[in-house]
Image (spheres, rainbow, N blue to C red):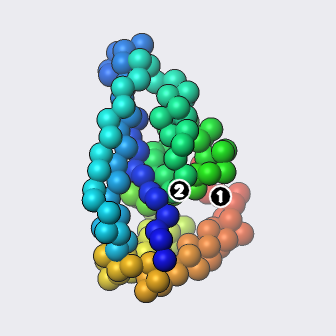
Amino acid sequence: MPMTPRLRCWHRVAVKPGKPAYGVYARDDRPSGGTQAQAVWFRYSPDRKGIHPQSHLKNFEGILQADAYAGYNEVYRTCKVTQAGCWAHARRKFHDIHVHRPSDITHHVLTQIGRLYEIEAGIRGSPPPIRPDTGHILYCNLAWLRVMYCDKVPW
């Protein structure tokens, strides 16, 4: 079974506005049992406008894991690219809230993300056909969060 191509992306800019930026695109599918060589591609941009990741990735089809940089939004809208969120970024937001205002919500979410991390630690490096579907944990918890706390979640 062929694997879906995946990229992890970073789009960085110099400290001063209007200065050049660069996109960094990396492929490393070893954690999910991939056998292709790891690769990294640096791409210069004269600024941080969203058109640059769109042009960099115009021929890419697959899974894209990126930060919340809005420049990737149009890439996802092509329907050729599936957005893969980053658990570290999501967890950090809940952790920061939990440190300042601990609640049952933040405790539960952090515990569930911890469960996903534990599962991943046990299956890292396994090919997709033998990796269990963990989506049910994610979907059940997102549904729980929306139903139980939609009006109370601090975002």
Q: Earlier in the sequence, mark 2 or mark 1?
A: 2
> Mark 2, mark 1: which one is toward the viewer?
2
- Disc 1 on helix, strand or loop? loop
Instruction: Residue 12: name its quadrant.
Output: top left
The image shows residue 85 at horizontal and vertical percentages of: 50, 56
Label 2 CA crowd tier, 10 Å (few <14, some 14–19, many 20+): some
> In which quarter of the view is residue 82 placed?
bottom right
Q: Decide if residue 49 is on the left or right side of residue 19.
A: right
Q: Residue 17, image x and y in percent?
A: 41, 15
Residue for point 39% across, 79% down: 127
Q: Which mark is residue 152?
A: 1
**Which numbered circle lies on residue 62?**
2
Amino acid under label 1?
Lys
Tell me where residue 68 appears, x and y as whole percent: 50, 43
- Vertically, is 137 above or below 70? below
- Residue 53 locus on image (x, y percent): 49, 34
Q: Which residue is drawn at 29% across and 50% down?
A: 39
Residue type at mark 2? Gly
